Amino acid sequence: MPQGAKTLLGHAANRLRTIGARLRPRARAGSAAIEFALIAPIFFIFLMGTMETGIIFLGNFVLQNATNDAARQIRTGQVALGGISQTAFRQVICGEISPLLACDGNLQVDVETVSTFSQAAVTNPITASNTLDPALNNWQPGTVCSVVLVRTFYTYPVATPLLTAFLVNINSTQHLLTAAVAFRNEPFNNQVAGC
């Protein structure tokens, strides 16, 4: 290779090294933003999924607590003696779950009287079409010493995208929260001494 070509090639190599040295710090400056842009959507989806799973578990606890409190009104005779209707009983439960769960038609209450505790079987509330059974809307609070089964159902709409397949258990966008309590009514009038 002629001497002039070597000098020209060396000069070009030095120039490229100088340009490369100036570009490297700038090239690394934006890499964190690009990495964050790639990872952030996945991170936020998992964060939302974790939060929604927590809300579902907390919602189930709140629903069970509200069902227990409302069922106590049946057990102690406040419903029978006070003439509380099915709508008013539902509103008692709505009042307790409303800070966390919106009571806008998603709540279904089923109160049934059975002859013994062994007959208080909890059946599957989901129909063959993967919806909540609308027939589970009974109102039989019973009388003194009756065995009563109170069940509540709440269809929670799942909002986390891409994770709905893991969080839903009814329809394609909802998670069914359930609560149940079985008890024998107390002798709340003077005519019956004990059960």
Image (cartoon, rainbow, N blue to C red):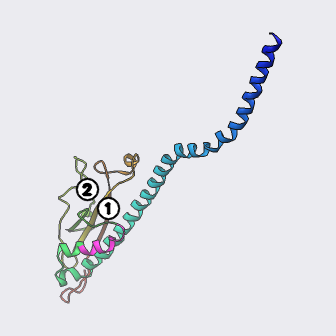
Name the residue at the top extreme: 1
Residue extending furthest toward the right = 3
Residue toward you, 82 or 10:
10
In this rendering, does residue 91 appear at all?
Answer: yes
Q: Determine which residue is flagged by label 1.
A: 178
Which residue appears at 25% of the width and 52% of the height? 126
Q: Give the crowd class for mark 1: few <14, some 14-19, many >=20 residues within 10 Å.
A: many
- Residue lying at the far front in this picture: please name it: 4
Residue 134 lies in the magenta-colored region: no
Q: Does 112 appear above or below 32?
A: below
Report the span colored magenta.
Answer: 91-100
Badges 1 and 2: C-beta atoms under 8 Å apart? yes
Residue in front for this viewpoint, 38 or 86: 38
Q: Amino acid at mark 1?
A: Thr
Return the x and y of residue 66 as percentages of the image width and height: 33, 72
Coordinates of residue 129 in the picture (x, y in percent): 22, 47
In the rendered structure, which disc, 1 or 2, sits on the residue that comes first in sequence?
Answer: 2
130 or 19, nearer to the observer: 19
How much space separates mark 1 and mark 2, taking CA atoms?
9 Å
Q: Indicate whether 137 appears above or below 33.
A: below
Q: Is 143 displayed left or right of 55 in the figure?
A: left
The residue at 69%/41% (across/down) is 25
The answer to which image quadrant residue 35 occupies is: top right
8 left or right of 39? right
At 77% from the left and 27% from the top, the residue drawn is 14
Mark 2 residue type: Pro
